[in-house]
Image: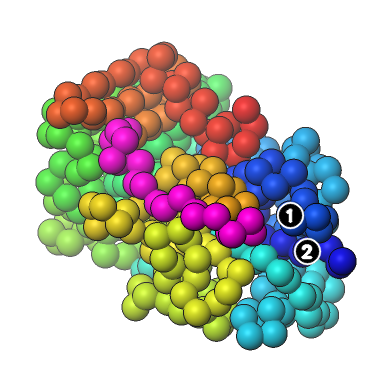
Amino acid sequence: MNDLTCIIIGGGHAGLGALKAIKEKTRRIANGRQIRFVLIDKQPGHMRKVLLFRPAVGEEEIMIPWTHYEFSEGVEFVQGMVTFVDSGEKQIRYTDAQGNDVRIHYDLLVVTVGSVVRQPDPNQGGISLTDLQSAAVIRECWRANLRQAVGETNPKERNRLMTVAVAGAGISGVETSAELALEMQKEASALGLNPSEISVYLLNGQERLFLEGPKKVGRKLNQILGECGVTVLYNCKAMWEEAGVVMLNNGDRLPVGLCIWTIGLIPNPALRTMGLPLTPDGQVLVDESYRVQGAPGVYSIGDCTRIVDPKTGKADGMRCADCGLQADRLGKIVIADLEGRTAPVHKSSSSIMDLFCIGLGENRGLVWGRKWGLNMVITGKPAWKFRNIAWKAGSKLL
């Protein structure tokens, strides 16, 4: 008998997790047939997207070669962009790194193309933290501003050059602003500037931080951000940035050397050309066992998928922690389907425990959990260590 071909589209957190789980659960064989694994991704390696702010504040490498992983042995890695899924013929079409149009057959297909950062209109100015290229531009911009501030004799202009606005106060915005403030202070000190004159503003359109948890956690988060040198402006949105000034929704003008947009995630727009059933918001429609509707042998998990807990009716969010649990369960589902057994069904992470962890610079962090109605808050170095474990676990580095 011929081998089975299992293709994973997307090598982000969900894709890596799916590859590892399916490979381990099947042991590369099903019903006496060997399973050939192929991972297709537009990147040359796994990008640790949750750490995208790191190359914006420093020079940390967040791209991991596919061959770094032990479970990558025997896996074929293809750099390309999938353009269409023909579920009737069980084929996908993709454009490879050289621009060639290629078709490949699959027996099992896992769609994990994830999400992309929501971007403002180009006319709104500023820089969106979307990829490694934009991160590098942000890093060079604030560093150049500080170098220029050294010789600036006009106090107002020097203050502007030493000011950054981060528009969007989700976890990405919080982590970006905290690490940026701390790194800018170090750089200012090294240049002979007064680090206390560094100003980083986090623009929050809501009345408090961290709407996912209780108010006291939001207040604690605000306190730690203040200790990092971040000022949170509440009920405040950036409308646009032009010529070094951010116009706010209340009519105020905020002089800045740099405006960074971190305004959330949307499902990968590439899904809209693939021919899969989607929600109006652009997420793949699946059943309680991650099977894509009307496409036998096709599964989907992660940010690109609308996954609902059949017991609670609650949909999973776009979180790395949710991807990890989905991937582990998908391995069990795939082997059950291949062997004709009843497959497990989805269970949301929040039905087990609400848990969020936030990094706020070296040895600073906040972890909030809730179980049986009881709230748990951890801060400081223990929370920082917990956050680092979560980051590594998401990228299968543990």
Image disc number at residue 13? none
| Residue 85 falls inside the magenta stretch | no
360 relative to 330, above or below: above
- At mark 1, the secondary structure is strand
- Would residue 296 appear left or right of 250 to someone viewing this image? right
Q: Which residues are magenta?
A: 337-355
1 vs 2, front mark: 1
Indicate left or right for 257 with 95 as reference: left
Q: Nearer the viewer, residue 229 or 190?
A: 229
Say what amino acid the circle numbered 1 marks: Ala
Q: Name the secondary structure under disc 2.
A: strand
Q: Mark 2 highlights which residue? A: 4
Residue 203 horizontal side relative to residue 30, left or right? left
Quadrant occupied by the C terminus = top right
Magenta span includes 350? yes
Tags 1 and 2 in contact by the CB under 8 Å rule?
A: yes
Q: Residue at x 17, y 50 (%)?
A: 206
Q: Position of residue 346 (x, y in %)?
A: 40, 51
Query: At 52% from the left edge and 63% from the top edge, which residue is drawn?
Result: 300
- Secondary structure mostly seen in magenta is loop
Residue 102 is drawn in which quadrant?
Answer: bottom right
Q: CA distance from mark 1 to mark 2?
A: 8 Å
Q: Give the image location of residue 313, x and y in percent.
A: 24, 57
Front one among 169 and 277: 277
Task: Name the spot of residue 181 as percent of width and height, x first.
Answer: 41, 32
> Percent from the top left, x then y, of residue 63?
68, 44
Q: Amino acid at mark 2?
A: Leu
